[in-house]
């Protein structure tokens, strides 16, 4: 089953889409809402990946502060009569394109949220259709559009194609980093948490157990089994210059080093110079 499910929502009042495809959170189109907290007004963009609590907001939010959310177009608020079952704050609700509602708590820091489908069978059929959930196949809408043209040199290399499921391991303890259909890493900013990445090549969806603002550079990336850091001193990211983390993936009959950037939102990834002699990543942003 493909584990990163994105939701598309619209305003309950005017019916317009609230999706912002020009501003991404967790490398997916964000949910754009207006927000008011105290006397501060601005815009907030929520992650559209179900289960992720990441967002970008242009106003500062105090811990446990209750905010008012509204449509950036018609200005109607999304707060209803339903109270949060955890903290008793008002719940906001949005409509799902697939039919139904998503509700979330308006108190900053509370992670209570629910999804209610009008027709469960129709919603599940749409999920299976949109995400190919019957197999380990990545959704087309997050594929890298550029297609590379094979050269004579490529013909003698193994090509790991876009959408391929990368069996991933810690390069130190050799234990699998795959949990379900997600690649799980322990990460540190000010706090420790877990970052779940898509293990499909060139699919950049992610979600985390702690708040990770876009463009933040992680203080550390750690194996969740042996607690060994995966950050390397050199080389650096070929796109933004941040530190990179090393994991191992299976290719042919051996494990090879696979590098990812430690900056959230950066899509750079690559192989070692030695492995590039035998293996090429399809549609890689670096190669």
Image (cartoon, grey):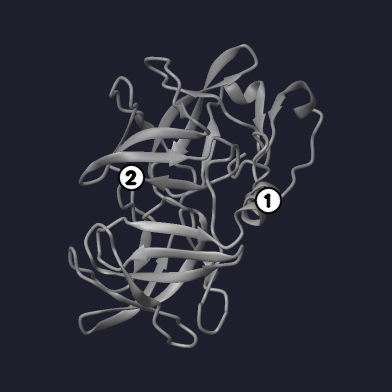
Residue ID at (61%, 62%):
98
Q: Which of the two residues, 250 or 111, is positioned nearer the viewer here? A: 111
Q: Which mark is residue 125?
A: 1
Disc 2 packing (10 Å; few <14; some 14–19; many ≥20)? some
Tell me residue 202's x, y (percent): 60, 42
Quadrant of the drawing holding the C terminus? top right
Q: Which residue is mark 2?
A: 209
Q: Residue at x 59, y 45 (%)?
A: 285
Image vertical order of residue 51 relative to residue 18, above or below: above
Residue 58, position as x, y percentages in the image: 32, 73
* Quadrant location, the N terminus: top right
Locate residue 195, reporting x and y percent. 38, 40
Residue placed at 51% from the left, 29% from the top?
258
Q: Is residue 190 above or below residue 279?
A: below
> In this view of the protein, can residue 144 be seen by the observer?
no
Q: Residues within 10 Å of mark 1 (few under 14, many from 20)?
A: few
First in sequence, mark 2 or 1: give its number: 1
Q: Is residue 254 found left or right of 240 in the rendered image?
A: right
Quarter assignment of residue 271: top right
Spot the residue most to the top.
253
Up/down of 130 relative to 181, above or below: below
What residue do we see at 43% from left, 40% from top? 196
Left or right of 40? Residue 248 is right
Q: Which quarter of the figure has residue 55? A: bottom left
Mark 2 or mark 1, which is nearer to you? 1
């Amino acid at each position: 089953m493909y584990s990163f499910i994105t939701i598309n929502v619209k305003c309950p009042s005017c019916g317009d889409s609230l999706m912002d495809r020009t501003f991404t959170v967790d490398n997916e189109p964000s949910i754009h809402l207006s927000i008011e907290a105290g006397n501060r007004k601005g815009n907030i963009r929520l992650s559209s990946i179900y289960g992720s609590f990441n967002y970008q907001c242009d106003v500062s939010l105090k811990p446990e502060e209750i905010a008012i959310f509204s449509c950036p177009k018609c200005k109607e608020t999304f707060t209803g009569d339903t109270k949060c079952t955890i903290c008793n704050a008002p719940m906001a609700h949005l409509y799902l394109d697939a039919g139904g509602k998503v509700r979330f708590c308006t108190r900053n820091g509370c992670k209570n949220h629910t999804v209610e489908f009008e027709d469960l069978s129709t919603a599940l059929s749409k999920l299976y259709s949109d995400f190919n959930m019957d197999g380990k196949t990545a959704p087309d809408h997050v594929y890298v559009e550029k297609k590379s043209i094979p050269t004579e040199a490529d013909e003698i290399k193994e090509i790991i194609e876009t959408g391929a499921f990368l069996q991933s391991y810690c390069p130190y303890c050799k234990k699998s980093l795959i949990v379900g259909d997600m690649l799980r890493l322990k990460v540190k900013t000010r706090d420790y948490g877990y970052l779940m990445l898509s293990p499909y090549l060139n699919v950049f969806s992610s979600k985390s157990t702690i708040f990770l603002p876009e463009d933040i550079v992680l203080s550390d990336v750690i194996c969740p089994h042996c607690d060994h850091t995966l950050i390397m001193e050199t080389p650096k990211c070929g796109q933004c210059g941040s530190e990179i983390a090393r994991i191992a993936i299976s290719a042919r009959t051996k494990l090879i080093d696979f590098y990812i950037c430690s900056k959230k939102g950066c899509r750079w990834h690559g192989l070692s110079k030695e492995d590039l002699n035998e293996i090429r990543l399809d549609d890689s942003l670096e190669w």
